[in-house]
Image: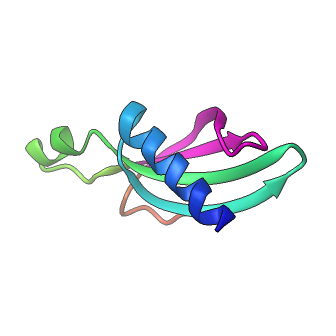
């Protein structure tokens, strides 16, 4: 149930402040909480309008012990069709 709560909190936060979550690719317990990697589709409508490949933003998200977002940052921006080297 813990991971379900974490996913819900992160999804809600991203929907409100960044962009809808496309995919959560990792969830790890960290020293003082949790660390996630989240992918979102950046500026979807703009890319569709100009017939461009969608851009995927890859974000690193930290949650505290109460499972609340304490920080996030975009680590990478890539075309959806590019191969992820991770």
Structure colour scheme:
rainbow
Establish if 48 lies above or below 81.
above
From the viewer's perspective, tell me whether residue 35 is left or right of residue 41: right
x, y (%) of residue 28?
A: 75, 60
In front: 30, or 12? 12
Inspect this view and state whether residue 85 appears: no
Tally of numbered tags: 0
x, y (%) of residue 62?
A: 70, 41
From the viewer's perspective, tell me whether residue 75 is left or right of residue 81: right
Q: Residue at x 37, y 42 (%)?
A: 15
In front: 66, or 53? 66
In front: 6, or 31? 6
| The magenta stretch spans residue 74 | yes
x, y (%) of residue 80?
A: 37, 58
Q: Residue at x 12, y 50 (%)?
A: 51
> Residue 70 is drawn in which quadrant?
top right
Please identify the quadrant where the C terminus is shown.
Answer: bottom right
Q: In this view, which residue lies farthest toward the left?
A: 49
Specify the segment rendered in magenta. Answer: 56-78
> Residue 45 is drawn in which quadrant?
top left
| The magenta stretch spans residue 55 | no
Establish if 25 lies above or below 32.
below
From the viewer's perspective, tell me whether residue 57 is left or right of residue 3: left
Q: Residue at x 55, y 57 (%)?
A: 7
Inspect this view and state whether residue 1 appears: yes
Please identify the quadrant where the N terminus is shown.
Answer: bottom right
x, y (%) of residue 10?
A: 53, 47
From the viewer's perspective, tell me whether residue 46 is left or right of residue 8: left
Q: Main secondary structure of the magenta part?
A: strand
Q: In this view, which residue lies farthest toward the right?
A: 31
């Amino acid at each position: 149930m813990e991971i379900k709560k974490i996913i819900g909190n992160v999804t809600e936060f991203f929907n409100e402040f960044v962009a809808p979550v496309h995919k959560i690719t990792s969830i790890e317990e960290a020293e003082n909480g949790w660390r996630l990697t989240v992918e979102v589709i950046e500026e979807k409508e703009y890319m569709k309008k100009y017939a461009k490949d969608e851009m995927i933003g890859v974000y690193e998200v930290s949650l505290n012990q109460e499972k609340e977002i304490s920080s996030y940052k975009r680590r990478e921006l890539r075309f959806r069709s590019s191969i992820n080297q991770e």
